[in-house]
Amino acid sequence: MSNGIKILTGNANQPLARKVSEYIKIPLSDTTVTSFSDGEILVQINENVRGSDVFVVQPTCAPVNKNLMELLLLIDALKRASASRITAVIPYYGYARQDRKVQPRVPISSKLVADLITAAGADRILTMDLHAAQIQGFFDIPVDHLFAAPVLLDYFKKWSVKDMVIVSPDAGGVERARAFAKRLNASLAFIDKRREAANVCEIMNVIGDVNGKDAIILDDMIDTAGTTTQAAAAIRNKGANRVFAAASHAVLSGPAIERINNSVLEEVIVTDTIPLDEKMNMCGKIRVLSVAPLLAEAIKRIHEETSVNSLFV
């Protein structure tokens, strides 16, 4: 695999990038990503990339703007160094929640970010569990959209639970929860909620039977954990035995850790699209599963120009 392929990363999620490189058996390319005293970012590629097929592993997680700028500068540096193809591997795509105008005079930020990445010189995007699938259409370059479901499903299939229910925290996530429940032979429920303001929601009702069952709240991301913990409380009040949460992206901003620690949740299962070492030390309920093998397999297939269709499950 070393012939013509290079993998590099910024500072956003170096542990994940190292796991991907170990899986493919290619060392990370020597790259300098640092900052001047005034905060300007300095990027330098310290080895020849001319004619190489380059993959930049860089989620745009917190600090979002810094990590996004690192990604743009890395892509620009590679383009100016004559890399033959540049694939932006973005396990977590920031600004994805701003994908439409919900009120007057607001930007469609996820479209703007897509334009920036394309203008910087990316030839292809490899990402995972976009908040809205239609964001793929914001790019004028090919997008491979993976899902963390296979990783989460492998974990839950090892359970010996007989009576399980998959719960969507809102009506919009029912399709995801239904597909998950089908693969686990579990029943389905969802939460009817009313959002009062950004990052604030009120749980109204549990639709479906959760009484006497082990419930798994399934979402694409957990941000402030308000929705997840309130949903967990509502499900427990309806008679569920145990309540778990599962999500692809553990944003865990603001009071998220405190809310999870004080909630009825038994465990929160997430992936390593966002680095979590510090937050895991603050919360013993978090279990992290790695998506590195999934991303690495996609990178190998993209480089070899073979189908990645079997990974879209």
Image: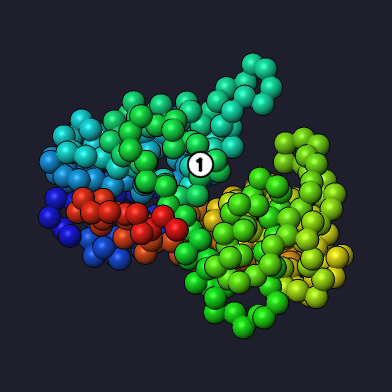
Q: Residue at x 55, y 40 (%)?
A: 132
| Near-viewer residue (49 or 238) | 238
Q: Residue at x 58, y 65 (%)?
A: 182
Circle 1 residues within 10 Å: few <14, some 14–19, many ≥20: few
Expressed as whole percent of the image width and height from the top left, the position of residue 140 reads: 35, 29
Expressed as whole percent of the image width and height from the top left, the position of residue 272 reads: 49, 59
Which residue, as the protein is rendered here, is positioned at the far bottom? 160
Quadrant of the image containing the N terminus: bottom left
Indicate whether 76 appears above or below 160: above
- Is residue 211 at least partly visible in the picture? yes
Q: Residue at x 56, y 32 (%)?
A: 99
- In the displayed structure, does residue 64 sit left or right of residue 162? left
Mark 1 = which residue?
133
- Where residue 43 sits, quadrant-wise, is top left
Quadrant of the image containing the C terminus: bottom left
| Near-viewer residue (253 or 183) | 183
- Where residue 101 sits, quadrant-wise, is top right
